[in-house]
Amino acid sequence: GGGTQTKLKKPMGQALHDTVLSAVRDMIGGEFEDGTMLEQVAQTWKDTVIVPWVRDVVGSDAYEADAWESKLDFAVAECFATIRIGEIFDIVATFPDSMPAVHELRDALDRTRMHTKLATELRASLSRRLIHPGANTSQIISVYCNVIKLLREIDPSDGLLDVVAEPVRSYLRGRNDTVRCIVTSLTDEKAGGDLYEELRRQDARPLEQAQLDSDDEGDAPDYDWSPPPSLFKQRGTMGYVSQSGGTGDILSMLVGIYGSKELFVNEYRVMLADKLLANLDFDTDKEVHNLELLKLRFGELSMRQCEIMIKDIDDSKRINSNIRETIVEKKKKRKEDQQKKKRKKTQQPPEAAEVDEPVVDCAIVSHIFWPALQKEQFKNHPRIQSQLDEFSLEYAAFKNPRRLIWHQMLGTVQVELEVVDEDGGGSHMQEFTCSTLHATLISHFEDKQQWTLEDLATETGLSEESVKKKMGWWIANRVVQLVKGRSGGATVTKYELTSVDELADTEHDSAADSDYYEDDGEEQALSARAQQAEEMQVYESYIFGMLANLGQLPLDRIHNNLKMFASGSDHKYDKTARQLSSFLQKLCKEEKLECGGDGMYRVLKK
């Protein structure tokens, strides 16, 4: 009797566990939106199937004496938690739709204390399925936000979060585009999602008040975590006392990955510059709204330069309007004077003076407050330059003694051109929005039908490589074509305007001409590259100084020294090791430094 029962307890318990695990998996697997799985489905199945069977096997007396009821309750909760922990990555990915499953998992964990298993499994799943080169940074950030919100449903103290999210934070910190993705999500409604809504929270606090991640503070997180007492056991107390203080909102935790808000403010300045310069209507309402929200979180002082940038665009709209009116009035007056002279000779009746509207609009920026903009210059086509000169003269009169310095690479021109149909059967007029360099290049074809690459480079004052890349855009749009010609006994490739007859008669070797179709797309990054290059240039003297004094140093020593010695200056060092490595490689290419096979950098002696 009793001895047999004792011997059977272990195998019977194992068999029961396997049966319950299999049955519960079949009932709840993959179903995250039904909040009745634990209590109604699993427990009902236990009461109708398992309990009667166990009573029959062990007897009613033994069932009560050995507390089988509580054992079976625990077994169901444990199996439920085990299955949900195995599905935890999918629950994170479908959050907040999976909120019912999260609440049930929290209840099961309160009974079983399997929090460590959850932390281990979720951390491993994130490392295995999320933080790898194939995942987009925006996807990683989105999942990280879901992890924060999900784990706070289970553990508001952030103890679990500190353990689980540490690999994700470290990985994001090493990615070059993390800051840009976060800032884009905050300010762009289309790309935003959780972060876009986060910036617009009514209860949001400034980052100085919100508690940041303790990523760089105290001891590293570990698995020796125990949950705080259940709310129901905190008799005589009100509220929840957290162990590590889960008070930081999502934005403050993302900023806390880097421990500094300056990176985000600088990135926003660069993005804002791109948006403002690409905004041809001078409409700043959306950017003003975003700026006001960002000022609430990052502080008004941090956003002062951005405020001036937006004011520049608003002022530009007013100045443009005044200058356009002045130009029109002067043109009308000149035309009226000409008509008066003509009427005196011919005795004709007066006619209404009609003049062409000015075609130049200008974004006038206070360069001290803007990020570094592209400064490369070229020679505009005379017809374009005359329009710019006319605007410059009126501005000089309107804002004396100020003068305009044109950033030619940043302009946008709208041109209407005749384009050959794709089937080659005819042509049609098409409007293009292009850079001033593209417009200058195509304008030269009004003066002469054919141009060599060398001639175009001479006319614009740019390298042949730069011109070839830009001309590729006009070739791709069927405005210009490549033709073979001869000059001094050698075969020369020339550009000429595409016509229907010539397109039909000309044979093209697309493979041979493929390198003429390149376009580096610099218009898409108006200032980011220049901004980073200029910022890094500031630290060049620091680097040469330390290498001159210390001989040779590895990358990490240079990085740490810059953080130490450049932190209190006007140019605070906030770059990543990867950005520094790129800059050091650039100095090596310029033959200012050299890097040995041991990874040590030293000043190149000439």
Image: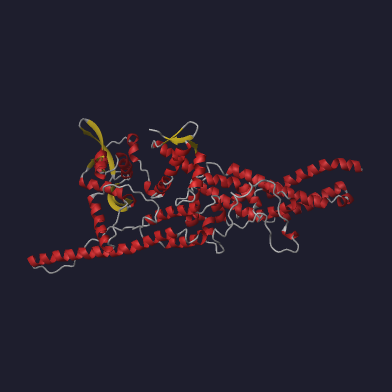
Q: Residue at x 51, y 49 (%)?
A: 138
**In the displayed structure, does residue 553 sit left or right of residue 308?**
right
**Above or below, comparing residue 356 to residue 114 in the picture:** below
Task: Please state the horizontal and vertical placement of residue 453, each as a whole percent of the image.
Answer: 27, 39
Most distant residue in the left direction: 345
- Quarter of the view holding residue 473: top left
Please tell me which residue lies in front, 77 or 192: 192
Most distant residue in the right direction: 1
Task: Please state the horizontal and vertical placement of residue 368, each as a whole percent of the image.
Answer: 38, 55
- Quarter of the view holding residue 285: bottom left
**Above or below, comparing residue 571 to residue 580 in the picture:** below
Most distant residue in the bottom direction: 349
Please tell me which residue lies in front, 570 or 126: 570
Q: Is residue 26 visible?
A: no
Task: Please state the horizontal and vertical placement of residue 440, each as a whole percent of the image.
Answer: 27, 48
- Quarter of the view holding residue 370: bottom left
Please tell me which residue lies in front, 532 or 417: 532
Q: Residue at x 30, y 36 (%)?
A: 508
**In the displayed structure, does residue 224 sit left or right of residue 382?**
right
**Above or below, comparing residue 334 to residue 498 in the picture:** below
Q: Residue at x 90, y 41 (%)?
A: 3
Q: Give the total of numbered labels.
A: 0
Colour mapping used in the image: secondary structure
Quadrant occupied by the N terminus: top right
Task: Please state the horizontal and vertical placement of residue 387, each as a whole percent of the image.
Answer: 25, 56
Quadrant occupied by the C terminus: top left
Please tell me which residue lies in front, 365 or 37: 365
Q: Is residue 213 visible?
A: yes
